Amino acid sequence: MATSPPKLPSTAAPAASDAAAGALAASVGGLVTGGLRDVSARLGELHDSQRLLAGTVAAKAGELGASPEWAAAAAVLDRVPEYRAKVDKIRRGMAAVAARAERVERAAVALAARLEERDRERASRKTADVAGYASVASR
């Protein structure tokens, strides 16, 4: 069975088709225009709200700047780099003291070992001297 070619739309009534397209375009245009008006109105409200908020924040910042507590806190915060430098200097000093203490401790341990060795040598010599004296005295 042979298939028949698809039917093409009739071009007999282009005026009706153009009228439908125009009506559709007008309806879509109306929807878009209405939405744009709504968005524009909301943006205007947002702009006004943001302006009011910015004014409020500026007023509060002015109040804070005039506050004596804020001035005192700002003065302390301005000195933070100075305090940080002092703390770093103290840390470096403490590290140097710790290093010196460790060297002194190692030297003390070495000195104690040398003294102990010297005492052992003296004791050994004394024992040898006593033994040598006893052998000379017995003759």
Image: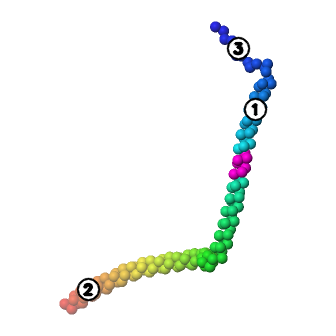
Quadrant assignment for the N terminus: top right
Give the side of residue 98 with respect to residue 36, left or right: left
Label at residue 5? 3
Amino acid at circle 2: Thr
Which mark's residue is nearer the viewer, 2 or 3? 3
Q: CA gap, disc 1 to disc 3?
A: 32 Å
Give the side of residue 115 with respect to residue 87, left or right: left
Which residue in the structure is indicated by mark 1? 23
Q: Nearer the viewer, residue 18 or 134?
A: 18
| Res 97 visible | yes
Q: Nearer the viewer, residue 9 or 12?
A: 12
Which residue in the structure is indicated by mark 2? 127
Amino acid at circle 1: Ala
Give the side of residue 127 with respect to residue 2, left or right: left
**Residue 106: x and y, percent?**
42, 78
Which mark's residue is nearer the viewer, 1 or 2? 1
At a point 55% along the width and 75% down the height, the residue shown is 88
Magenta extent: 36-42
